[in-house]
Amino acid sequence: MAQHIRIALAGNPNSGKTTLFNCLTGTRQRVGNYPGVTVDLKEGTIRRGDVDITLVDLPGTYSLNAFSEEEVVARRFLLEGKPDVVVNILDASNIERNLYLTTQFIELGLPLVLALNMSDVAKTRGVEFDLDHLSALLGAPIVPTIGHKGTGVEQLLEVAVGVALRGSGYSDVHLSYGQEIETEIASLIPLIESHWDLAATYHPRWLALKLLEDDAIIRSAVCTDEIIAAAERSRNHLRVVFRDAPEIVIAERRYGFISGACQESVRSTVEIRHTLSDQIDAFVTNRLLGIPILLLLMWIVFQLTFTVGEIPTKFLEFLVGLSRAFLNDVLPAGMLRSLVTDGILGGLGGIIAFIPMIMLLFLALAVLEDSGYMARAAFVMDRVMHRIGLHGKSFIPMLLGFGCSVPAILATRTLETRRDRFVTMMIIPLMSCGARLPIYVLFCGAFFSDSARGYVVLALYILGILLAIAMAKVFRGFVFRGATTPLVMELPPYRIPTPEGVLIHTWERTWAFTKRVFTFLLVVSLIMWYLSNFPVGPDASLSPSERINFSYAGRVGRLLAVPLKPVGLGDWRVGTALFSGFAAKEVVVTTLGTLYNVADTSEESISLRQAIQDDPFFNPLRAFVLMVFTLIYLPCAGTFVAISRETKSYRWPVFCALYLTVLAWSASFLIYHLGMFLGIGIQ
Ligand code: GDP
Ligand code: MG
């Protein structure tokens, strides 16, 4: 009879979990369906002999407190998912730090197997392990592995399956917390055991420890006043004895245990403590050089994204244009043709062409991340970010926001607290994403001289950043109060990224983005197409722009022209274009193209530029105000959905859309009237 076991892979970030997971499951993996979990858990099922094995790749964490979303997710899985065995992946080159998490598994009392991964790196650094001794001290079997080469991976699986089938390979190792703490633990355990529901869900000793550590989630889960009160008494007692918070003393004891175990079983044959990583860090995280180096790297990333990315983008644009022209020829004139060429290809084409740039951006970021640099970037930016009430790690999502808000919003998952996450999500749409560029290109080309264009675009980017900073301060002051969490992040050693790792990371993110484009944005494009083609005008000979004028979209545009009048944009075509921009911001340009009767798609931007230039409604000031407005107003539909998915509510994206639109209106109003008053750009 086939048996079925579940193995959880757990470990610190960058310990090689995903590498081992990929090595074992290959392509047989999918995102597991765990309700209420905000961080994706990947799982894969394989078979060895007559055993079906499901592997779950838990999020990387440094501990199992309830500080970050990753920790909460990993812990919940371990407690409620009841895996048959936990495979704890350790970075052998950084063993002491990695073992902290291990102590928490020991406390949880779960069947445990340790994978000593990166054993190649440890070897080159001259670190030697007495594996039998270490294994005895930790009470769990240890298997050395080299993840990216697959060395030791099958043995690891074999040992893990063995432990799972035996029920427990876990010999009762006691991590002792010293007499004072042990007394308190011992006094809490009988209380916990007297509540059978608690004792059934949690390991009593672990629960007692968590109560002493004042773990927020556990405290609210244990809704028995008697136990809470007893735990509070114990905590007070310990605080008096140690003159320090009990959770700190407990953490120190764990480190003490680790350092003792390592002293007995890990030996360094190399005396020099200054590793290459330390030497690089002396420059990279230097107070003075840190930020310039960061800016330089970012500049290179953006150059790569936009200049190299332009080549495939141009090519894809060409292909899309070609298919539109082809379909225009073969399909009979009418609604079907319009639906296919304008509705589907017109709406999606602009974004498809954009995918290579997104992919390159993700590629560059994956290299920076896998090499260990991103952790340094967050470290370097932490002080600056704290000034505006954000966390150092908010920097990475904000940076991604210049490419596209959707992956940027997904990237906020690395933030520890809900507060930091939400503030970051709310300001990400202010980072001028790539989809705004076609709008800038069009209007700058039409109204600003060659030499001025660069500065105008730069001014728009800077305006977005300044507004983001201002809004972050406002949100931290009024909506999400409280201190920012300190950056507790140890810097992992630098590592040459492996091509497989980088490609997998890039692929996963690009795929997530592409999926969204093809599903959700397709629907939105179709809705926008419907709105701009129906109801059909009374007369078949109407020009495209007259037809839109008659349609729902035109009506909404006319309606929007009223509130847009005070900011100098009171024109129904602008209203319609801005309305359609909800689908995706670059659609503003496509819509304007239709409204100005510029039918030829391949030369669109040039002839549209001319048409807009000739329109007496526009002048440089109005063009600038329109660019400011599109920079700030409504996040696009993709962003809207991303925020809603990540916050699991509709309130936050609606709030975001409302505040941004009010902000856009106010900023445009100020700029327009200032410009009018000073007489700039109105001829
Ligand atoms: P995760 O964050 O724990 O999922 O870590 P990853 O699986 O993404 O691995 C981080 C990096 O370490 C990747 O670039 C891997 O290719 C690399 N890596 C994984 N295992 C080993 C190993 O045993 N030795 C070496 N030298 N590199 C490894
Ligand atoms: Mg991973």
Image (cartoon, rainbow, N blue to C red):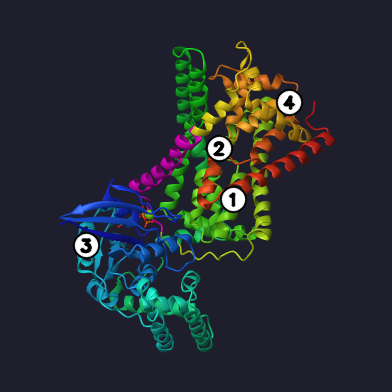
Instruction: Tell me the tag on residue 174.
Output: none
Which quarter holds ligand 2? bottom left
Q: CB of mark 1 within 8 Å of CB of mark 4?
A: no
> Could you tell whether 86 is left or right of 682 in the image?
left
The alpha-carbon separation of the residues under discs 4 and 2 comes to 24 Å
Q: Whole-Å distance between the Cαs marked 3 and 1?
A: 45 Å
- In front of the other: 349 or 682: 349
| Helix, strand or loop status at disc 3 | helix
Label located before the other in sequence (1 or 4): 4
- Please name which of the two marks, 2 or 3, marks the residue nearer to the observer: 3
Q: Where, by quadrant of the figure, is residue 612 drawn? A: top right
Tell which circle, 3 or 1, labels the residue nearer the N-terminal end. 3
Relative side of 62 to 572, left or right? left
- Residue 495 horizontal/vertical position (percent): 38, 55
Label 3 crowd (10 A; few <14 / some 14-19 / many >=20)? many
Q: Mark 4 points at which residue?
A: 618
Q: State the CA–CA distance, disc 2 to disc 1.
A: 23 Å
Left or right placement of residue 272 versus residue 581 in this view: left
CA neighbours of label 4 inside 10 A, class few (<14), some (14 to 19), many (20+): many
Q: What element carries label 4?
A: loop
Which sits earlier in the primary sequence, circle 4 or circle 3? 3
Toward the top, the furthest residue is 541
Identify residue for label 2.
Answer: 434
Seen from the viewer's position, the closer of residues 42 and 113 is 42
Label for residue 652? 1
Determine if the magenta segment contains residue 517: yes
Q: Earlier in the sequence, mark 2 or mark 3?
A: 3
Q: What residue type is labelled 2?
A: Gly
Which residue has dot 3 on it? 161
Which of pointers 2 and 1 lies earlier in the amino acid sequence?
2
Residue range highlighted in magenta: 494-522
Which of 630 and 517 lies nearest the eye of the viewer?
517
